[in-house]
Image (tube, grey):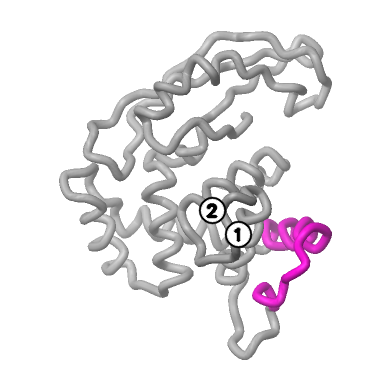
Amino acid sequence: MIAIHAGNTVPECDQAWPKVAAQRPEACPICHMAGHMIVHGRYPRQKPLEATPEPPQPVKVRRWLCTACKHTTSMLPDIFHRYRQYTWAVIGAALVRRFVLGQTWSQIQAELSQMPADVAPAPSVDSLRRWCQAYAGYAQAWLKTMLAVLATVWPQLAQLNAHGVQAASPPQQLMPATATLASWLSPARGALAATTVADLRAVWRWGWNQGLAAQIQ
């Protein structure tokens, strides 16, 4: 699978479909051979739950076939997490509230149920726990890779210092690293700022396409 950016909501992804459908991958993400990708149909990503008043709708996902290794791959809009029914608008908000704001499960659920009114039901506490446990589980591996990249391109890494006055767990360290990497990936974003859901989406897309996907369950 290749993660792509195609808008911030399901309707925006629908509008971007003509462009996405013609966006041929340069190389196969499995065998890495270039020039062998051919169209292999499409499939609907069913019923995403996102933080918008619109009812859930399927989104068209383009499939490609590599004529070299015979494997297929898809181009999934990054509003989705590969393995979760909720979109990043909800999942990312939960992660920021837990690891940046330090909120309790009840506080997170209460706030997500109001984001905004008349949206899909707030995720259960069990779902929130699973998301945060999965994030914490791959945080160490992602942090190591992200810091290796940032060390070569970013001159200001003081805020990523793990030996500050207050000890921080890998998931907590990963949040500011995410904001920093997102700034580098999107220069128009400006100077360093607090981690946002958009940062998490951008870095998830980057990490998936960098081969870190094996860490996400």
Quadrant in which the N terminus appears: top right
Q: Residue furthest left?
A: 118
Residue 178 badge: 1
Q: Residue furthest bottom?
A: 165
Q: Is residue 71 left or right of residue 17?
A: right
Q: Quadrant of residue 106?
A: bottom left
Q: Is residue 211 left or right of residue 201?
A: right
Q: How many marks overall?
A: 2
Q: Is residue 19 left or right of residue 113?
A: right
Q: Residue flagged by tag 2: what amino acid is it?
A: Asp
Residue 37: where, in percent of width, then height? 72, 14
Q: Quadrant of residue 148?
A: bottom right
Q: Quadrant of residue 182?
A: bottom right
Residue 199 badge: 2
Q: Residue flagged by tag 1: what amino acid is it?
A: Thr
Assess whether residue 125 is covered by the magenta stretch: no
Disc 1/disc 2 C-alpha distance (Å): 6 Å
Q: Which residue does the image show at 78% across and 56% down from the upper left? A: 149
Chain-order first, disc 1 or disc 2: 1
The foreground one among 216 and 209 is: 209
Q: Answer above or below: position of 62 versus 138.
A: above
Query: How many residues crowd mark 1 within 10 Å: few (<14), some (14–19), many (20+)?
Result: many
Q: Which residue does the image show at 36% across and 53% down from the upper left? A: 127
Q: Is residue 128 left or right of residue 152?
A: left
Residue 31: where, in percent of width, then height? 80, 25
Residue 16: where, in percent of width, then height? 47, 23
Query: How many residues crowd mark 2 within 10 Å: few (<14), some (14–19), many (20+)?
Result: many
Residue 217: where, in percent of width, then height? 55, 46
- Magenta span: 141-161
Q: Secondary structure at mark 1?
A: helix
Q: Answer above or below: position of 10 versus 120.
A: above
Do labels 1 and 2 touch, CB within 8 Å? yes
